[in-house]
Amino acid sequence: MGSYRLVRRLYFRSSDTFDRSAFPWLRALDVQVQGAGSAGGGNGSGGSGGGGGAGGEYARSFITDLSLLPVLVPVTVGAGGIGDSTVGSGDGGASSFDDLVIAVGGYRLSSRQAGGLGGTGGVGDLLIRGGGGSGGSTGSPIGGAGGGSFLGTGGRGLQSSSTTTDGDPGGGYGGGGGGGRGDGAAIGGDGAPGIVIVELFA
């Protein structure tokens, strides 16, 4: 990137702090932030399919003015939504690098069969909305597929009439969970967690 030289890459898979003073040679940062996915819907008492959860948003910024950052930069990594027999435990968590780069998590389902809406509304030079989940069936045991993200894939949406199958979890980072399906009660798949990737340039 121009006259900058990549020296190190840091991966934050859980919330932590970036200590800028530990890198006195630092001149610029390339920050990638992925929001978490929401959970897929359950199928209640059976005979239907839950909707797919949504993918989290992706945000990226190249930061050259380091005076914008505190010495100790808070790094937040969003947790994926947890599936249950209804609409899951809420939105996928937002991930952020201070308040300069923010990626919103996938949104919770509005009903068991409705697909979730992809995360959007974050902050960054580049913003990519999370993929929406597909709807599940109200009259047959077909679960909706979870929405993908820039760094992850959605859980599969499949038909399962002979067996009761919980939804597949979201894959990678930020993928939405698949919907539960089958003749018996099934729970939705969990959303995949977020991640923050920081590249350090001299």
Image (spheres, rainbow, N blue to C red):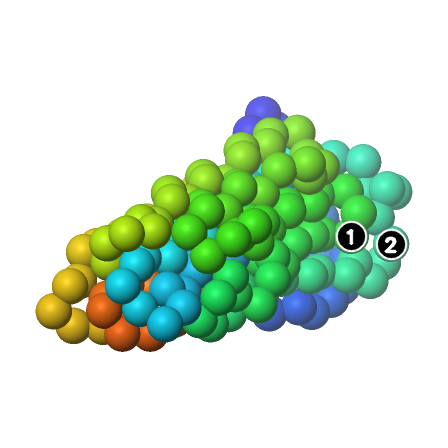
Label 2 sits on residue: 70
Give the residue furthest to the left.
Answer: 162
Residue 125 visible here = yes
Q: Residue at x 56, y 50 (%)?
A: 110
Q: Which mark is residue 98?
A: 1
Which circle's residue, 1 or 2, is located before the other in the chain? 2
Q: Quadrant of the C terminus?
A: top right
Image spot of residue 79 (x, y percent): 58, 66
Classify the position of the N terminus by image quarter.
top right
- Give the vertical position of 113 relative to 30 (above or below): below
Residue closer to the observer: 4 or 132: 132
For residue 72, the mark is none
Q: How many marks?
A: 2
* Residue under the image location 58 percent in, 25 percent down: 2
Between 172 and 130, which is closer to the camera in this rendering?
A: 130
Q: Are marks 1 and 2 in contact (CB under 8 Å)?
A: yes
Amino acid at pointer 1: Asp
Q: Amino acid at mark 2?
A: Pro
Circle 1 packing at 10 Å, graded few (<14), some (14-19), many (20+), is some
Residue at x 81%, y 42% (from the top left corner): 66
Viewer-nearest residue: 120 or 182: 182
